[in-house]
Image: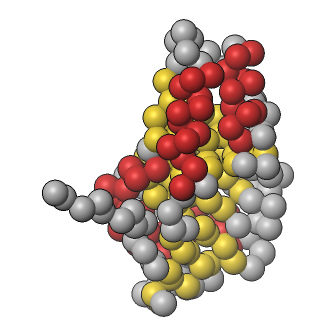
Amino acid sequence: MSEAVKATSALEGFAARGFATVTESGLTGMITLRGDLADKTLAKAVKAATGAAMPEQRKITTGKSGKVAWMSSDELLLVVDHAQAPAVVEALTLALKGQHALAANVSDARVMFEVSGEGNAARETLAKLAPVDLSPEVFTLGDVRRTRLAQVAGAFWVEDDGSFRVVAFRSVAQYVGDLLAQAGSTGSEPKYF
């Protein structure tokens, strides 16, 4: 009989410091939810799962049990506790039975990084990589962007403390981690710790 494999984050322990600090966030529950975002049943299911309201276009909302990010006109990303992700998918599937909707646990197919630093260090780091106006007047708390990070797809948002969370595919985790570390370095090689 085969043994269960213990879940591990993509780059467990990844951290680099320059003028910005980049760390891999560890195991994070992430669920893709596709459906009619205007549907009241879907909104109720999302609220029950996360405590968060439905986000508007290019926004992220926070609830007691997670965050909900707008990804496209028919797609949300729910960020929840990693251990709870399977149960959340099951609850969403049950609540949306008969609806044209799909909930999928993508936790182990994604990676999340935290980018932080003094002042606008996190913004400056991401501005080097993404075609997004990240000035504090334009990109504010509650905004989310699904875009490119150099040559790969990614998404990010700003947290209350000014740090950013960056989501990318697990298959490019090392590339994105190194990319963020280099963009946040002081011009020399980033210091990994």
Residue 153 lies left or right of residue 29; in this view the side is left
Front-lying residue, 85 or 15? 85
Residue 175 lies left or right of residue 129; in this view the side is left
Residue 57 lies left or right of residue 34; in this view the side is right
Q: Residue 130, can we see it? A: no
Q: Looking at the picture, how far across and down is residue 139, in whole percent?
A: 75, 49
Residue at the image position 55 percent from the left and 85 percent from the top: 17
Q: Looking at the picture, how far across and down is residue 133, in whole percent?
A: 67, 49
Question: In the rendered image of this protein, does residue 51 appear above or below residue 126?
Answer: above
Q: Residue furthest left?
A: 1
Residue 8 lies left or right of residue 166; in this view the side is left
**Quadrant into which the N terminus falls:** bottom left
Residue at the image position 58 percent from the left and 61 percent from the top: 126
Q: Residue 30, can we see it? A: yes
Question: In the rendered image of this protein, does residue 158 appear above or below residue 46?
Answer: below
The part of the image, by quadrant, that contains residue 170 is bottom left
